[in-house]
Amino acid sequence: MTATNAHARAPWRVEAPLAPIEGESLDGLIARVAAANWIENALTITSLAGVVYGHKPTLSTSGWDGLPILADCLQVDLDELQHRSYPTDAEGRRTFYGAPIERNDLDLSVRRFAPAALSTSPHHRALWQLRAFPFCADTWQYLVERCPRCGAIQRWHHTNGVARCDRCVEDLSAAQADEVPFALRSTLTKALGLVHYDPSRKQQSVAALPPELQHLRAADVYELLVRVALVVEPRLTPARFGTSARWNQPGPVVADAIASAWHVLLGWPSSLENLMADRLRAAPKRHGDGNNGSTMRFLRLAANDGMSGEVRETIEKFRRAVDLDGPNSALLHERTFSSAEAAARLSRSTRGVGYLRRLGALNTIFVVHAHRAAPRYDAAEINTLANVIAARVPPEHVAWRLGVSYHGVEQLFAMQLLETTGDRFCLHRYGSVQTTRQKFDEFLSRFHQASRSALASDPVTLRVAVSSIGGRLKPWGPIFESLLQGSLPFILNASRPALTEQILVDHSSYRFLRSLRFNHSDYPHARFSSTMSRKDAGEVLNLTPRVYTEVLQAIAPADCEDKSVSVSEVERISRVHISTREMALRLGTTSKAAIAIAQEEDVPLLGPAGWCRATCETRLGLT
């Protein structure tokens, strides 16, 4: 340690000088030296550099003229103090280890700390003074500012050392602190590198960016990062006008915003367009940006906002690319539709199109028009959806043509035996996924290719054969899959209207049909209705319309406005009851004979829904 300026002599020198630690803040160094030399107040030292007020004894605020005297007092190199004092540049910003940043981005009055880091090395890291990074990159703890014992906010008034409370002298390493989620750490490491005291870290962070941002310096990227973070998290913006952050949100909110902003920079510029479009998608008002004004504040560049020229040009270039009235106008008009144009193609009103956009059924393209955020629509997507609307076949029609339940069609969609199209749009527009005439015709044609010329014995229609399945929903998906794969032989009788009436299977197929299962848990991303029609309930219960109407009266009265019934309730009934029809098919006899056998074996008749399933299967040996 050497005094750096022979002409700047301090009136006194500390008796126990300490060497600055790499990355240590100036205020932390002074507090550590003062504590080691039993100096009660930091002002005793900082007053040598020109500090006057005892309630604000910090030096990390400007380039003080008295730093040479202070360096002589502390017996350290002047350079060690100068780059830690965050001097002011010509634009009024602070220079943090070579990176000019906004004054408000530094927290110099509060002594934030990471308890685990203090227990490792009791010194104050300069990076802890950056409000954009409210965590310790060594321990990944969120920074805290209060004493765990007395609750006092830690400042720089007293000199008990940075590892102890400046009021009650409690050990600050005992404080509790939450940790940054592991998923954010690699991202935040790259972001923090932009302002790191190690120049190689700055280079690594800039090198990770796309070519569109490679021309920027690390300090410029940091400035852009903060401005993008305000778009990501509008709560960081202080007022209706202005682009400086106020950083008054909890640490996890700030860290999430910075991490998300870094991902936006990695995907620049398309990722920023997507972010703005996603916020605009849900905008409730016509001329709002859907982001509390933060999106348009980012794009409106004031002449005197202190922004660096490189960052200004980068944002200007982005704005020109999305400006409907700018040089990209012809291309944007070619590739996108206005609300009126999209409504015309989809045969909807503009209000209806806006409603679908807010639901997420339509992709939103962000543009600026007349200095306002304006939603546009992907022309290719709208044209595709227009074709889908013209050719769509709803699942209700598929169920009718196949002669199966609505749930059976849902199984076909889930197993991708029958392809769907435009799912995101159709779910919001029609309440269910849809298929097209072409895809449905292709599905039907596969049965003509898979059919046999003859069967071994007298055939029965598939519709009758599935009545041997009870106690659960019919596994239509696995049944059709077995038909197409050849494991369930069949022939076709094209004279019948519904496919399940056209398909003829062997009598011996009953046991095979009952072995087939459809497990909803195997298709976690598929959608299944929780209600069904009365007709579909009759299919599950193997009952005729007259009988199932009486049975369902108990759970859904006939005069009820909602004619649907609960799927789970129908399944419950089917597990308790077995119909005469199912019992006869499984016994291989007539209904009349099945009734006689059940009565002879004292199987309880529970009501119009049928007999006691458990007793019937046990006493009659049904398998």
Image (tube, rainbow, N blue to C red):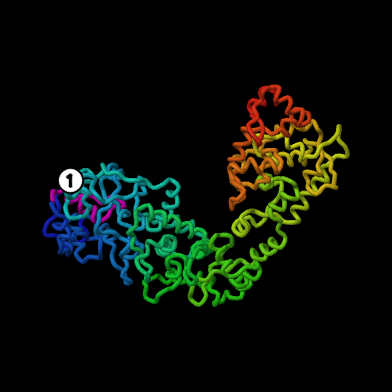
Q: Is residue 621 above or below residue 342?
A: above
Question: Looking at the picture, which amino acid does disc 1 mark?
Answer: Val
Label 1, residues with CA under 10 Å away: few <14, some 14-19, many ≥20? some
Q: Nearer the viewer, residue 76 or 289?
A: 289
From the image, which quarter does the C terminus lie in? top right
Question: Could one spot residue 19 in this view of the protein?
Answer: yes
- Residue with the mark numbered 1: 169
> Residue 12 at what x, y percent from top left?
12, 56
Which residue is pictured at 73% across the width and 50% down the height? 400
Q: Residue furthest right?
A: 453
- The residue drawn where x is 61% and y is 32% is 576
Count of residue discs: 1
| Residue at the limit of the structure toward the left, as seen here | 11
Q: Position of residue 325 (x, y in %)?
A: 54, 77
Between 480 and 47, the residue placed more toward the observer is: 480
Examine the structure image and report whether residue 23 is included in the region drawn in magenta: yes
Which residue is at 15% across, 58% downward? Answer: 43
Residue 280 lies, in percent from the top left, at 50, 65
Q: Is residue 290 above or below residue 14?
A: below
Give the magenta range.
17-39
Q: Residue at x 35, y 68 (%)?
A: 239
Q: Can residue 349 be found in the magenta stretch?
A: no
The image quadrant that residue 382 belongs to is: bottom right
Q: Nearer the viewer, residue 379 or 358?
A: 358
> What secondary structure is found at the residue carrying circle 1?
loop
Q: Position of residue 289 (x, y in %)?
A: 47, 68
